[in-house]
Image (tube, rainbow, N blue to C red):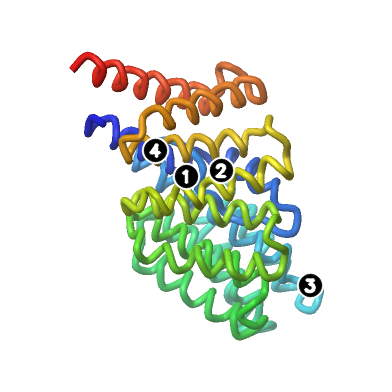
Amino acid sequence: MRLHHILALAVLLAPLSPATLAADAATGTAKKSSAKEKTGSSKARKAAGAAAGAAAAYSVASVAVTSDAPAAEAQNQHCLEAQAAGPSAQAEAACRQAIGEAEKSAPNSKHHATALSQQAALLAQQGKLAEAEAGYKRALAMYETALGPNHLAVATSASQLAGFYYQNDRYAEAEPLYRRALMVDERALGAEHLEVGKDLYNLANVQALMGRHEEAAGTYTRCLAIREKALGGQDPSVARSLAGLGMNYAMAGRLPEAEQSFARASQISEKTQGADHPETRHYLSWLNKVQADRLAMIGQ
């Protein structure tokens, strides 16, 4: 396949927007987490992924936070709301207040870890990558200590750190964290849970971008089966799984399979989201590119 098409198709793995992330996260009923199933430029994917990170950080609280530290919980909620409009002095202040309250009323707790995660998401938005990475790592370690290594909040936190690495093209570091999230979720929720499907999608993205296309195809296929069984054949998440599988086939030079996957993804997206939806247009664009490359190969 032509190099510029391969590079363009790889962008399918990038986040598009926090809104699309939120829609896909809703397919996980036990917990919410960040996802990586969107399209956009490298710069846009990093900005969108970091913006969504604040919501993903607080979503850990939906699993982990109870009323044992209401002041810390309230500050975390305030921090989330302040970050909704993007990086700002107000958001920075809210993060500092949330961490300060957690250090005072609930040190080294799940509340403290949530505050650190939210600050890490803000730092990532601001391009302060070393500080963001340190924050995500500290939050993950704190969740592990406070809740144990097999808690769902630990899976979400591991996925957040993996997402940070993924957004910054550090795929080898993202992979073991995505695998860990998968292991915890599968053990706690069952092998056919939608959250497991999301973990598989994230892992497949990394495998594809690392050039392990056969392995990625198997992982995408398992994700697709989970989503089809839980959601039916006509759902945007099913379309995204098919588009990821199509991208992987295209990068591996398996153009007939890529064409079939993109054709079905575009049909599902058009039916469920409309012909003018950004995802529908992207899937059709990739389908057209794959078809053009097939014709070019036939003509050679």
Question: Could you tell me if the residues under marks 2 and 4 are in contact, i.e. CB atoms within 8 Å?
Answer: no
Q: Residue at x 43, y 50 (%)?
A: 216
Of labels 4 and 1, earlier in sequence is 1
Q: Which residue is mark 1?
A: 48
Q: Separation of disc 2 and disc 4 at Cα?
A: 27 Å
Name which quarter of the figure residue 237 lies in. top right
Would you say 213 lies left or right of 236 here?
left
Q: Which residue is mark 4?
A: 249
Which numbered circle lies on residue 66?
A: 3
Q: How many marks?
A: 4
Location of residue 282 in the rendering, given as x and y in whole percent from the top left corner? 45, 26
Of labels 3 and 4, earlier in sequence is 3
* Residue 87 can be seen, yes or no: no
| For residue 155, above or below residue 211 | below
Residue type at the position of mark 1:
Ala
Q: Separation of disc 3 and disc 2 at Cα?
A: 26 Å
Q: Separation of disc 4 and disc 1 at Cα?
A: 26 Å
> Dot 1 lies on which element?
helix
Q: Nearer the viewer, mark 4 or mark 1?
A: 4
> Dot 3 lies on which element?
loop
